[in-house]
Image (cartoon, rainbow, N blue to C red):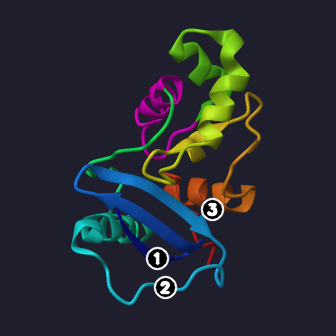
Amino acid sequence: METVFVNSPLGITKIVGDENGISIISVSDVGTNEVSKKIPEILKDAVLQLEEYFEGKRKDFDLKLNPQGTEFQQKVWKALLEIPYGKTVSYMDQTKKLGDVKAIRAVASANGKNPLWIVVPCHRVIGTNGSLTGYAGGLSRKKWLLEHESPSAQQSLF
């Protein structure tokens, strides 16, 4: 496994992967980890695609993914990949799509354990009432990501 730490607008991004795919993309506060001086060849495309996302030039990722989790978590994470850029769904919507409305807590827990920050867009799942509930990266990051993906950019009044 190779690891790289790069700057992002939301903190230090950690990317871990190998020839089988990217297994971890996470974020931490600045000062938590040192930015890498060299990017391993196998992780260069992931770094580039994340940079393009933050620059507003990328809406979809084309990476080989290899997240580690239970069969249920994998199913939940796969469903997250179907939420389009700039759209949100509620935890209840996600649970219904997966076929068991009684599993809402399990679905929310699996979302919280998503190891592929941004690429598997758990930030696009919100509360039924539209609230920004639960996000492992912190609600301020979730808000930033949703605003970044918002189709209607704020117009200047002057």
Residue 8 on image: x %, y %: 51, 75
Which element carries disc 3, helix, strand or loop? helix
Lateral position of residue 85 relative to residue 96, left or right? left
Q: Amino acid at mark 2?
A: Val
Residue 63 on image: x %, y %: 27, 52
Q: Is residue 145 in sight in this rendering?
A: yes
Which element carries disc 1, helix, strand or loop? strand
Q: Which residue is mark 1?
A: 5
Q: Amino acid at mark 3?
A: Trp
Magenta span: 71-88
Q: Which mark is residue 144?
A: 3
Direction front: furthest residue: 1
Q: Looking at the image, do the residues carrying marks 2 and 1 touch, with CB atoms under 8 Å apart?
A: yes
Between the C-alphas of marks 3 and 2, the distance is 22 Å
Q: Which residue is mark 2?
A: 35
Question: How many residues crowd around disc 3 within 10 Å: few (fewer than 14), some, or many (20 or more)?
Answer: some
